[in-house]
Image (cartoon, rainbow, N blue to C red):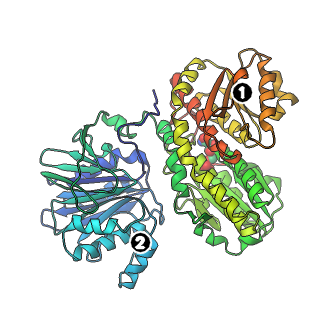
Amino acid sequence: MPQLREPPCKIESMCGIVGYVGRPKSLEVLLGGLRRLEYRGYDSAGVAIITEEGDLVTRKRAGKLSVLVDDLAAEALTDGSTGIGHTRWATHGGPTDVNAHPHLSRDGKLALIHNGIIENFAELKAELLADGYTFESETDTEVAAKLLGREYEAGGGLAAALGRVVVRLEGAFTLLALHRDEPLVVVGARRNSPLVIGLGDGENFLGSDVAAFVEHTRRAVAIGQDQIVTITPDSVTVTDFFGTDVEAQEFQVSWDASAAEKGGWSSFMAKEISEQPEAVANTLRTRIHDDRVVLPDLAGLGEKLADIDRIVIIACGTASYAGMLGKYALEKWARIPVEVQLSHEFRYSEPVLTPRTLVVSISQSGETMDTLMAVKYAIDAGAATLSICNTQGATIARESDAVIYTHAGPEVAVASTKAFVAQIAALYLFGLHLAEVRGTLSGDEIAGALDELSSIPGKLEQVLLTSTRIQELAKWMSDSRAVLFLGRHVGYPVALEGALKLKELAYIHAEGFAAGELKHGPIALIEPGQPVFVVVPSPRDPNSLHAKVVSNIQEIRARGARILAVAEQGDAAVLPFADEVIPIPLAGALFEPLLAVVPLQIFAMELATAKGLDVDQPRNLAKSVTVE
Ligand code: AGP
């Protein structure tokens, strides 16, 4: 049964990290650990080992772990008793051999791997360049490796050097490092990204979660925020960033190895629904400074951005519903005409495109053929192109003038959830940036909207806590044959997405309608007991859409429908007419969809589970539709 309650070690970031000290079998431990972390999704892998002869050897390859394993089979790597391993989900720099971890110090004696995003890497890199350092990769991680190598030369040992480095880093990171002059030692540090210790007998482990070592030991210690750990075969030391010892609490890992594959979640779908707060937070991270949007990602558009007079958003499925929400925001904030077209319809409609048209494609995979062909059509027609994509280096991103990457992390379940909310967040950032460029919003108005946007991760955490009641509802409705979803204004794309989730997960006929459309035909579908989800606008809505939707509810209730309302906390007007009210926190009209969609995602997942269906790999579906 999927569950949205957190497992002991909530998964906070996406790459895989393994560290080991003990017996001369590092390679087996590292590769085994990385294999158990594969569920996290990644696009390159690498290892570093200190051999029994005291040499530091490394191997890293873009692609799946199997590429690295095949490479090691073709050309053996000397093994040793000290090692670190990494699977990377590209954030800074595409998935290439050079960008893969580990990265080395200038003298090649130290290796480092990293999870997360070092926000101030550019200024640190400039400092090192001025110091005569050179770099081979595009990554923020290599900057940390060079910095640590320089600090190590200043003396005090590896742990002390790491402490001096991490106090200078901003952002989210888990770092592991080893140095050939300190064999049988691995050090680690974490801030806003997980790191756990596995306690063995004559050996010790580190991992981004317990899946990294659960096959060797179930004794674990979670490391706290801003802490450093040093492991040797017979000792484990945990300190703060300044070297002061701190207490660390041991716990027993309760998961079995197969559950550990998904970080303790019973399905990728449950895991990814739970990751939506950080998907939005990570997409916003580094892009809001001093109450303004900072989007260097748009550099590729150059002067075109200020000159556009129309936007066409193209996407498929869930991504297209994010696009519909983007339309509302862009038109409201930037006062520019926006139309949303399904990618596979776009180029056959002979659209009117000019160099002042900006075609914005939205794609989680960045490989959807319908969208890729539409982007190529737009490029050939001379339009400017912007991609909103969740996959670094994907084809659609590379074809476009510019790309705003969402940082939702790898989305493994076929049905999209966390990428959807991240796409909306990216579209809203773009809309507010465009409003500043076009002077259609004041600085205070932009700041206010950014405050709202920044509050969404916390509000999503609150919504995730309502999952128990939704689980009960889903069980009751598991024999439903058709479910309707109503929404108005920004609630309409949410209704469409809720219907799509139910179709693709529970194989139940479901349809989303604009609530105002009901009396123009669909109300004929209403019969006694017909389940209808209604996404209710805020009662604070200035356009009194709330009153209109409440009267829609009364119309269908009078005909026997069973009403499940997703409504703002404290909305008393809905209570008398709804059989169930699922509350969401207060948020501005444009921001409510980011919250209202979550109960609908959970409902679809729980109903599919009640029917014994595979919520991660639904029948007939592919994660990326790379055929037209
Ligand atoms: C979403 O749940 C579906 N799996 C599907 O509609 C998907 O959103 C669509 O195929 C677009 O995929 P993309 O975002 O990778 O381009």
Mark 1 or 2, closer to the camera: 1
Q: Nearer the viewer, residue 118 or 500?
A: 118
Q: CA distance from mark 1 to mark 2?
A: 56 Å
Q: Nearer the viewer, residue 567 or 159?
A: 567
Q: Left or right: where does residue 624 sit relative to residue 7?
A: right
Task: State whether residue 316 is above or below residue 578.
Answer: below
Q: Left or right: where does residue 344 sit relative to residue 457?
A: right
How far across and how far down the image is residue 141, in percent? Answer: 38, 66
How far across and how far down the image is residue 134, in percent? Answer: 37, 80
Instruction: For the residues labelled 1 and 2, say whether their Cβ atoms are less than 8 Å apart.
Output: no
Q: Which residue is the site of mark 1?
A: 574
> Badge 1 local density, few (<14 within 10 Å), some, or many (20+)?
many
Respond yes or no on whether mark 2 lies under 8 Å from ligand 1: no
Furthest-right residue in this view: 520
Q: Kindly identify the amino acid type of the residue bearing the numbered disc 1.
A: Val
Q: Say which residue appears at 54% left-offset and 56% top-offset.
A: 283
Task: State whether residue 609 is above or below residue 221.
Answer: above
How far across and how far down the image is residue 624, in percent? Answer: 57, 47
| Residue 280 shows in this picture | yes
Q: Which residue is the site of mark 2?
A: 137
Task: State whether residue 242 is above or below residue 407.
Answer: below
Q: Nearer the viewer, residue 8 or 512?
A: 8
Ligand 1 sits in which quadrant?
top right
Residue 96 in which image quadrant:
bottom left
> Badge 2 local density, few (<14 within 10 Å), some, or many (20+)?
some
